[in-house]
Image (tube, helix red, strand yellow):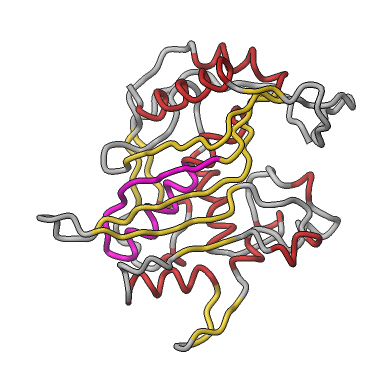
Amino acid sequence: MSMADDIFVRMCTKIIEQGTTTEGQRVRPHWADGSLAYTIKRFGVCNRYDLRKEFPALTLRPTALKSCMDEILWIYQRKSNNVRDLKPHIWDKWADETGSIGKAYGYQVAQVSHYVDGDFDQMDRVLKDLRDDPYSRRIMTNLYTFADLSQMNLYPCAYNVIYNAVHVPGEARPTLNMLLVQRSQDVLVANNWNVCQYALLLMMVAQVSDMVAGELVHMIADAHIYDRHVSIVRELIARPRFAAPRVSLNPKVTDFYDFTTDDLVVENYTHGPQVKDIPVAI
C-alpha cells in the first residue's frame, strides 16, 4: 500500500468530518456558472513523506509525473513566467496574450540579489550554499514578494521551500530534507500534484549536491475541499490502494540545469482510473 494514499485518505477524511465550512461567508472563488464556490477546510495541515522509503505518488488515481517534473523545471530551472515554455496547460487561463502570468513563479526565482561573494538568483544561491555550506539554516527560496503581488496574474500557492541537510551517523552522504510551505490548496485538484512536484525537486537537488533525498514536509495553511468536490473525494478515498511506484532519476546528471523530463524513470506504477470532469473554482 502506498503511504501517500494513506496520508491522503486520512487528510481528506479529517477535512470532511472535522473541517469548518465557508458556506454563507464572503468568498472570492466562484464556479463557471457564477455560483460562489464554498469549501470545507482545515487550518495548518502537516504531512510528512520519507523519500528514502518510497516515492509519494497516489495510486488511488494516476498523477502525471513527467508533467509534474516539467512544471517544477519551468519554475526553478527555466525560471519562466511564460506558459509557452511549459508543456502542460495548467496556467493558461491566467496568461495574457503574450503567454505571461506576470511577475509570478519563475520570475521570482530569477531575481538576483547581491551577496558578499557575488550576485545570485534564488536557485543558484540554493545550489551554491548546498555545495559550500550544506548545513546552513538559511537555504531557501521564496516566491511571495509583496512588492510584486499587484503585477502577478495569480498569487503563488506553494511559495516557500526550505532545504535542511543532516548528517546521519554511519551514512556516507548527508541527507537533504525539504520543508514546503503552501498558503492554500485545492486538495482534490492539486494535493498530490504539488507533493510529487516537490518530491522530484528534492530528488534533483539532492542528487546534484551529492546527498540523499530524505523527508519532504508539506505544510498547508488552508487545506480545503470545494463543495462540488466532496462526493468525488468520497468516491476517490474509498478506492483500492496499490504499492507505490519506483521513481528514480538518471544518475549521470550532476548539474541541476541539465535535467529534462527524459531523466525521470517511473516503474511499476499501478493505479486506479483517472478522475475526469472535475469542476475547477476560479
Residue displayed at 31% across by 69% down: 134
- Location of the C terminus (image quadrant): top right
Give the quarter of the image for residue 19: top right
Residue displayed at 49% across by 56% down: 161
Q: Indicate whether 186 appears above or below 259.
A: above
Furthest residue toward right: 34
Depicted 181 relative to depicted 11: above or below: below
- Please tell me whether residue 229 belongs to the stretch shown in magenta: no
Residue 142, position as x, y percentages in the image: 57, 61
- Is residue 195 left or right of 156 when viewed as pictured? left
Q: Position of residue 55 (x, y in %)?
A: 36, 38
Q: Is residue 75 left or right of residue 34?
A: left
- Quick one: which residue is furthest to the left in this view? 170
Q: Check the picture and name the quadrant holding the N terminus.
A: top left
The structure residue drawn at horizontal position 81% and vertical position 22%, both measured from the top left corner, is 24
Residue 212 falls within the magenta-colored stretch: yes
Q: Nearer the viewer, residue 146 or 61?
A: 146
**Is 131 on the left-hand or right-hand side of 150?**
left
Left or right: 260 in relation to 168:
right
Q: Which span is picked out in magenta?
A: 196-220
Q: Which residue is located at x 48 percent, y 73 percent?
A: 124
How many numbered callouts?
0
**Quick one: 9 or 246, which is closer to the camera?**
9
Residue 275, given in percent of the width and then of the height, sits at 60, 21
